[in-house]
Each structure stands twice: as structure tokens, then as C-alpha cells.
Image (spheres, helix red, strand yellow):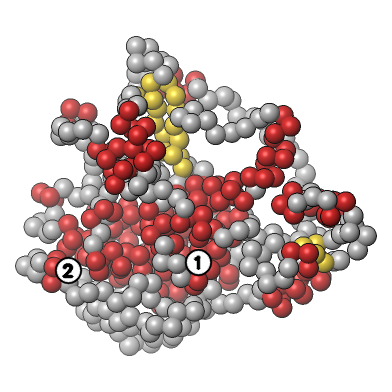
């Protein structure tokens, strides 16, 4: 009580309190953003009291439980849509983001399966992804898919744009539904498995791969001559059906055959600045102005200048070989703030990551403004914030798409490297920076140091 009533807490704004002083005094505090207690009531004299508070006010609910009141949707997903049926005949879609049903011991075709505890990921996939009214002639391939995801390919696609802007009506809702179910699968698998678990039957790493590669798999821009008479909408519909059936290996092989133009001269001529127009169409006027008024001279990275690119990076710091900290007596930390609100404030049509993953799908889902959706996103990014990402999936937070700009077009060796991280990393990094901006300012302003130079 003396510590909480001291100058450290009474004379400083709550966001700027140095909580390390609390640690030294043996005081713990609740870090849940939705804690129902007042800020001054969230401090506890011991770790056990904090854990008791968590059990009372923040119980670990089953991650697949949702507050949706609408019944689960029942839809059919034919393996191959008829090529004669126009996309306009597709019936209106049911509400977005269906509620997954509780796992059962039967598949959708009615045949008995083994104990789901023996292969919990397979039971989870059959529950979340398989179509409720599946065609018995199209058996589920999710066991083969999970084996493929145990050691998947991480080769970036040979294209940078996809068909996201072609998602219409039911296909858009279905794509959102699949993406949301993948996030739920990560939450469920992470709640029952250790991050160090590498068993494909229980690890969440394969679901991270699906999350990052979903646009790559479903929206790969296949050339018209390679679609066998299918329209873009029919191709998207077929790929969504294949995903529901677990044909991930086939989807990846089909996307691997798609390639952008190899030579600059092969690209068709375009009138005006298309990238600037796309930014303006999505109300991102700052980017539209910059792209239209200051067209960046993009350098083609190749054998002739790759050495110049690598010279821009300093040598990695040698390992410090520090002793790992003892975390046994440390209190749990959780993602501060409300990340769904941060996602809703993000801009669309920004650069895509290595695997053409974009912010747009997260923005569209967050704009549903549904408390259950917000809670699912909060729980997912809380796993990232707490470092509970499986080791095979951590590369998605380290990899960046690299391109370079000419500092001086007359000197090709003067380059400015630009890295575009994955959408997952940009979301969590931007959110944490917003939440702790006051703390950062308190530490950096005395040194007159700041980060964030426009076009710098």
C-alpha cells in the first residue's frame, strides 16, 4: 500500500508508470485490456493473487466458443462448378463468419472416425473447414493436407498482385469465413499444445502457414489461357471448394504455375499512375499524392547490382551469450489495448508481404465490428505478443519482401533498400507502437531522438 500510494503512482500518469519498480516491490498487476476492474484496483500483492484474479475475471474459455446467435450456415461446395453457369446465378450468401460446431466423432459423410484425441488437428479441420453438406464422392483430404503442412514449401510466389479485388458477393463472404476459421484453428491448437510442439497432428504451425498463404492459394492470378474456360469467379469458387476438401497440395501446385512477367518489356503499357489511383480509390490520399507526384524509380535487383544491395547491410552483431532469464516467478503479460480498433484504422492497398499477404483481409474482418470477432483477433495477436508462436511459424514475422529505390538514377550503385514485412508483423508492430507511444516518448525525447521520417 505504501508503494501504490507513493510518488511512483500518484504523481505520474498511468501509461508512464515505471512498472519495474512494482516488480522490485513484489507487486503484480493485471495486463488484460478488457479487465473489468478500475486501473487502481488491478494491482495485487503477490503472483498468486494475480492468478486468482485471472481465474475469476479472465477464465480461459474454449477458443471455439462464440457469442454469435445466428445458426451455423449450411452450404454446399461442389468440387468443380459448372462452366456454363454464370457467376450472377450464385445465390446470396448467408451471414459471414459462421459459428463452428463442436467436434464430433463422425465426418460429414457419416462414417465413424478414430478418436479425435489421436489426431486433434484432423478433427479440428473436419470441424472448421469441411463443408457441412459435403459430397460423399469427394472425400476429405485434410490428413494429406496436414502431412503437407508438416514440412511445407516457403518459396515465395512468382507474382506480386492477386485477385483480391475480384472477390464478389458469396465468394467474398466465403473467403472471409475461411480466413476467420483459420484464426480460430490457431487459437484452439495453441490452447492445447506447447509452442515447442512440432507434431503435425497437434502443432499450430501448419495453420499459421495457411493464414499467411491463403491469398496465395485462392487468389493466384492465373492467366486466361490456363483456366480451361473458367471465369475468374468460377476459378475462385473451385479453389475455395478445394480448400474446404483439404486439397492444399493441389492448390499450392496450381499457384506455383502462376508467374508474373519475367522481363520488364513483357509488361503491357498502362496509362497514368495505376498505383496512385488505387490508393485514392481506397481513401489513402497521402499515398496517392506521393505516388503521383514523386514516382519512385524502382531498381531492378539482379546480378549486376546485388553486391551493392548486400553492402548496404552491416554485419550481424556477434552473439552475447547471455544467461536466459528466469521466468518462473514472472507474472503473465497480455496484449494491451484493442487490436481490432488499430486494424480498423489501417490503410488499404498497401504493399504485400513475401507471400502476397495483405492487410486488406484483416481490415475487412475487423470492420464487421462484432465483439466475438474482435475477441478472436485479440486472442490471436495475444499469442504473438506473448511469444507463443511455434518455431516453424516464426519466419513469417522475420521475412520481408525486398525492393530498392534509386537514390540517384545516374548512379545505379546508390540504392535505398525497402523491406515489406508480412501483414501479421505490421499489424502487431503498429499496434504496440501506438499503445506505448507515450512511454517511448518519455524515454526518447530527452535525447531528442525520434523515429518516423516521411519517405525516409
Q: Quadrant of residue 321?
A: top right
Is residue 8 left or right of 120 when viewed as pictured?
Answer: right
Evaluate whether residue 309 shows in this view: yes
| x and y percentages locating residue 257 in the rendered image | 23, 47
Residue at 35% in and 34% down: 289
User: Mark 1 — residue?
Assistant: 374
| x and y percentages locating residue 299 in the rendered image | 34, 24
Q: Quadrant of residue 90?
A: bottom left
Q: Quadrant of residue 71?
A: bottom left
Is residue 313 left or right of 353 when viewed as pictured?
Answer: right
For numbered disc 1, what is the local secondary structure?
A: helix
* Quadrant containing the N terminus in the rendered view: bottom right
| x and y percentages locating residue 358 in the rendered image | 38, 50
Say whether disc 1 or disc 2 marks the residue closer to the N-terminus: 2
Is residue 82 left or right of 253 when viewed as pictured?
Answer: left
Q: Residues within 10 Å of mark 2 (few under 14, many from 20)?
A: few
Point out which mark residue 123 bears: none
Depth check, front residue: 211 or 147: 211
Residue at 50% in and 60% down: 340
Query: Nearer the viewer's eye, disc 1 or disc 2?
Result: 1
User: Mark 2 — residue?
Assistant: 80
As displayed, is residue 423 above or below residue 172?
Answer: above
Q: Residues within 10 Å of mark 1 (few under 14, many from 20)?
A: some
Instruction: Tell me the distance, in whole angstroms, between the alpha carbons under discs 1 and 2.
Output: 34 Å
Q: Residue furthest right?
A: 2
| x and y percentages locating residue 320 in the rendered image | 72, 35
For numbered disc 2, what is the local secondary structure?
A: loop
Amino acid at each position: 500500500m505504501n508503494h501504490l500510494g507513493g510518488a511512483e503512482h500518484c504523481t505520474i500518469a498511468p501509461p508512464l508508470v515505471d512498472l519495474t519498480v512494482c516488480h522490485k516491490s513484489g507487486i503484480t498487476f493485471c495486463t488484460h485490456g478488457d479487465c473489468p476492474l478500475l486501473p487502481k484496483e488491478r494491482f495485487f500483492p503477490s503472483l498468486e493473487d494475480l492468478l486468482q484474479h485471472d481465474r475469476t475475471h479472465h477464465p480461459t474459455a474454449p477458443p471455439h466458443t462464440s457469442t454469435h446467435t445466428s445458426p451455423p450456415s449450411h452450404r454446399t461446395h461442389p468440387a468443380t462448378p459448372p462452366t456454363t453457369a454464370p457467376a450472377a446465378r450464385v445465390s446470396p450468401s448467408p451471414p459471414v463468419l459462421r459459428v463452428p460446431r463442436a467436434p464430433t466423432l463422425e465426418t460429414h459423410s457419416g462414417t465413424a472416425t478414430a478418436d479425435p484425441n489421436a489426431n486433434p488437428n484432423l478433427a479440428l479441420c473436419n470441424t472448421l473447414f469441411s463443408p457441412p453438406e459435403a459430397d460423399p464422392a469427394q472425400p476429405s483430404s485434410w490428413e494429406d493436407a496436414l502431412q503437407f503442412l508438416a514440412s511445407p514449401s516457403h518459396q515465395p510466389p512468382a507474382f506480386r498482385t492477386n485477385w483480391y479485388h475480384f472477390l464478389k458477393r458469396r465468394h467474398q463472404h466465403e473467403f472471409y469465413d475461411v480466413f476467420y476459421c483459420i484464426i480460430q484453428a490457431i487459437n484452439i491448437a495453441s490452447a492445447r499444445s506447447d509452442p515447442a510442439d512440432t507434431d503435425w497432428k497437434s502443432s499450430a504451425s501448419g495453420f499459421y502457414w495457411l493464414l499467411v498463404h491463403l491469398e496465395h492459394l485462392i487468389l493466384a492470378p492465373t492467366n486466361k489461357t490456363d483456366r480451361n474456360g473458367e471465369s475468374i469467379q468460377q476459378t475462385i469458387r473451385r479453389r475455395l471448394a478445394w480448400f474446404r476438401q483439404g486439397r492444399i497440395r493441389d492448390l499450392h501446385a496450381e499457384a506455383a504455375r502462376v508467374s508474373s512477367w519475367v522481363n520488364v518489356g513483357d509488361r503491357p503499357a498502362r496509362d497514368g499512375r495505376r498505383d496512385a489511383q488505387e490508393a485514392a480509390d481506397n481513401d489513402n490520399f497521402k499515398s496517392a499524392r506521393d505516388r503521383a507526384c514523386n514516382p519512385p524509380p524502382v531498381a531492378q535487383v539482379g546480378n549486376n547490382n546485388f553486391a551493392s544491395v548486400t553492402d548496404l547491410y552491416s554485419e550481424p552483431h556477434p552473439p552475447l551469450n547471455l544467461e536466459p532469464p528466469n521466468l518462473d516467478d514472472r507474472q503473465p503479460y497480455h496484449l494491451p489495448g484493442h487490436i481490432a480498433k488499430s486494424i480498423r484504422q489501417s490503410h488499404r492497398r498497401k504493399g504485400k508481404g513475401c507471400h502476397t499477404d495483405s492487410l486488406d483481409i484483416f481490415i475487412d474482418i475487423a470492420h464487421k465490428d462484432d465483439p466475438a470477432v474482435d475477441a478472436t483477433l485479440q486472442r490471436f495477436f495475444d499469442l504473438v505478443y506473448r511469444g507463443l508462436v511455434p518455431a516453424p511459424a516464426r519466419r513469417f514475422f522475420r521475412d520481408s519482401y525486398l525492393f530498392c529505390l534509386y537514390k540517384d538514377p545516374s548512379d545505379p550503385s546508390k540504392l535505398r533498400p525497402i523491406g515489406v514485412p508480412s501483414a501479421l508483423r505490421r499489424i502487431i508492430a503498429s499496434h504496440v507502437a501506438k499503445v506505448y507511444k507515450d512511454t517511448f516518448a518519455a524515454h526518447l525525447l530527452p535525447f531528442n531522438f525520434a523515429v518516423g521520417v516521411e519517405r525516409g
